[in-house]
Image: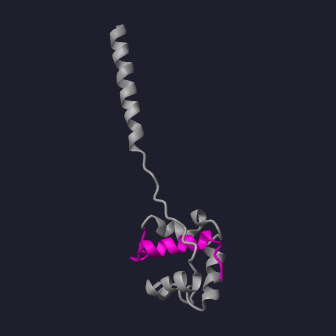
Amino acid sequence: MKMKILILIVFSFAILGSCTKDTIKPTVIPVNTTVKFSTDVYPIFSAQSCTGCHGTAGGLTLSGTPSAVRTNLLLDAVIPSASSTSKLYTFFANGASHKGISLPAASVSNIKSWIDLGALDN
């Protein structure tokens, strides 16, 4: 009986010990300290046809001057210096698509960097 218990204990440790190798590490996107809204983020919306649906009609408006678009983002989709809780970044960060549109990794990185740098009007 003691041998069965000993084998069960050894087997349990072997199974539990192997689980540590199955951890998933999140992708870390570095902050680009030279990113600017007017040249690196704002053009993403027209290049990806976001303004087709998010033009001037209700909801999140992504057409207009860079300052106007930035203001609209701050009202609904961006929390300055907090990309991890900003809708704009978290939605696309994991490769999600919106109405069939996925953002390239470089665009997602620029959005993250801009938000983490304070979502400046630059």
Q: Residue 107's x, y, as percent?
A: 47, 76
Vertical arrangement, residue 21 with respect to residue 17, above or below: below
Q: Quadrant of residue 36?
A: bottom right
* Quarter occupied by the C terminus: bottom right
103 in the magenta segment: yes
Vertical arrangement, residue 54 with respect to residue 117, above or below: below
Give whichever of 82, 4 is nearer the camera.
82
Give whichever of 87, 39 is nearer the camera.
39
112 in the magenta segment: yes
Q: Is residue 14 left or right of residue 29?
A: left
Q: Is residue 24 left or right of residue 32?
A: left
Vertical arrangement, residue 120 with respect to residue 64, above or below: above
Q: Residue 40's x, y, as percent?
A: 52, 82
Give whichever of 47, 116 is nearer the camera.
116
Q: Residue 70's x, y, as percent?
A: 62, 82
**x 53%, y 89%: residue:** 55
**x 61%, y 68%: residue:** 116
Q: Residue 120's x, y, as percent?
A: 65, 78
**x 56%, y 89%: residue:** 63
Q: Which residue ends up furthest to the top in the rendered image?
A: 1
Q: What is the span of residues highlighted in magenta in the rendered image?
A: 96-121
* Quarter occupied by the N terminus: top left
